[in-house]
Image: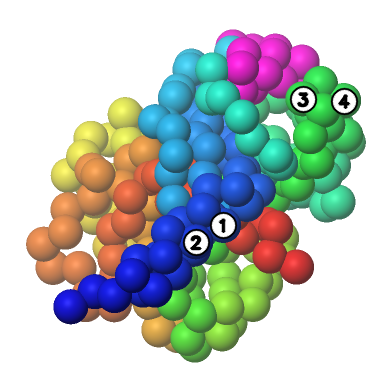
Amino acid sequence: METNSHREEVLHTDQIVAESPKTLCVDIGGSGIKVMVLDAAGTPVTERARRETPQPAQPQSCVEVICDLAKEQGEYDRVSVGFPGVVDEGITHTAPNLHPDWEGFELAKRLEELLGKPVRVANDADVQGFGVITSHGVELVLTLGTGLGSALFVNGHLVPNLELGHHPFRKGETYEEQVGRAALDAVGKKKWNRRIKIMIELLQKILNYRTLYIGGGNAKKVDREGLPENVKIVSNEAGLTGGIALWRD
C-alpha cells in the first residue's frame, strides 16, 4: 500500500523536475529545422515543431526560423542546438549541406542575443548520439539525411569532430556522395540499401564498434532485413532529445 509519505515524496520529485531548467532543443537539418522543449530529465514537454530549412540556407534566414519556432514553444531556460557540420565553442566551421556563409559564424552568440537565453551548440550527429548511446564500449552513430553525419563514442566519451561523411568510400566517391539523399534519389532505394550494407561491413572492420546506431530522416528507408544484430535503427527525435546532454557539465 502506498503511504502518504511516499506520495508526498513522489509529488515533491515531480515538482522539482517541473521547476528545473527547461531546454529548448533545436535540430538544424538540410531539409528541415526542428524544435522541442525538454524538462530536466530529458522528457519532452512540448510537441515537436518543424519548418522547412530556408533555401538558400544562409545563417540569418535559418536563425530567423529558429526564433520563430522558439516563440511557439512556451517557456524555456536554455537552448541546445544540433548543427550539421563542425562546431567549436559555438562557432560553426563547416556546413557542406547548408551554405558557405556558415564558416566562422558565431551561432551560439547570435542566438543568445536574439533569444536572451544561454546557448550551446554541437554537431547534430553528436547530439543524436547522446540521445541513444549506452556509454559502454565503442559506439558509432550515423545520421542519414541530406548528407551523412557521424559520431563516435568510447565509454560515453565523444571523439570530437569526426567527419566520416567526407572520407573516401568507394568508386572514387565519399560516404556522403554514395549514401546521401542525392545518391538515394539518383540510384533508388534498392541499390542505395546495398551501399548502406557495404558501408556497415566496412566500418565494423575499421572501428570494431560494439553498437552502430542509424538515425536521421532517411533511416526509415534502411532495409532492416539482414542487418547485423549490433545495428540499431533509432528515432530521428533523438536529434532533439539528446540536446539535454549539452548541459551535463
For disc 2, the marked residue is 12
Mark 4 near mark 3, Cβ–Cβ under 8 Å? Answer: yes
Q: Nearer the viewer, residue 40 or 241?
A: 40
Q: Nearer the viewer, mark 2 or mark 1?
A: 2
| Amino acid type shown at disc 4 | Glu
Q: Amino acid at mark 3?
A: Leu
Residue bearing mark 1:
16
Label annotation for residue 113: 4
Secondary structure category for the residue under label 1 = helix
Q: Nearer the viewer, mark 4 or mark 1?
A: 1
Q: Which residues are magenta?
A: 55-71
- Point out residue 151 in the picture as x, y percentages from the top left corner: 57, 63
Helix, strand or loop at label 3? It is helix
> Label 4 to label 3, Cα distance in Å?
6 Å
Mark 2 closeness class: few <14, some 14–19, many ≥20 residues within 10 Å: few
Q: How many marks?
A: 4
Which label belongs to residue 179?
A: none
Asked if residue 241 is positioned above or below residue 71 in the image, the reply reads: below
In front: 238, or 104? Answer: 238
Q: Position of residue 173 (x, y in %)?
A: 51, 49
Q: Give the main secondary structure of the magenta stretch.
A: helix
Q: At x 44% / y 24%, what residue is drawn?
A: 49
Q: CA distance from mark 4 to mark 1?
A: 29 Å
Question: Can residue 27 be seen from the camera position used here?
Answer: no
| Numbered circle sitting on residue 115 | 3
Above or below: residue 223 compared with residue 103: below
Asked if one can make out residue 226 in the rendered structure from this viewpoint, the answer is yes
* Contact (Cβ within 8 Å) of mark 2 with mark 1: yes
Q: Earlier in the sequence, mark 4 or mark 1?
A: 1
Mark 3 or 2, which is nearer the eye? Answer: 2
Number of residues whose C-alpha sits closer than 10 Å to that of mark 1, classed few (under 14), some (14–19) or many (20 or more):
few
Mark 2 falls on what kind of element?
helix
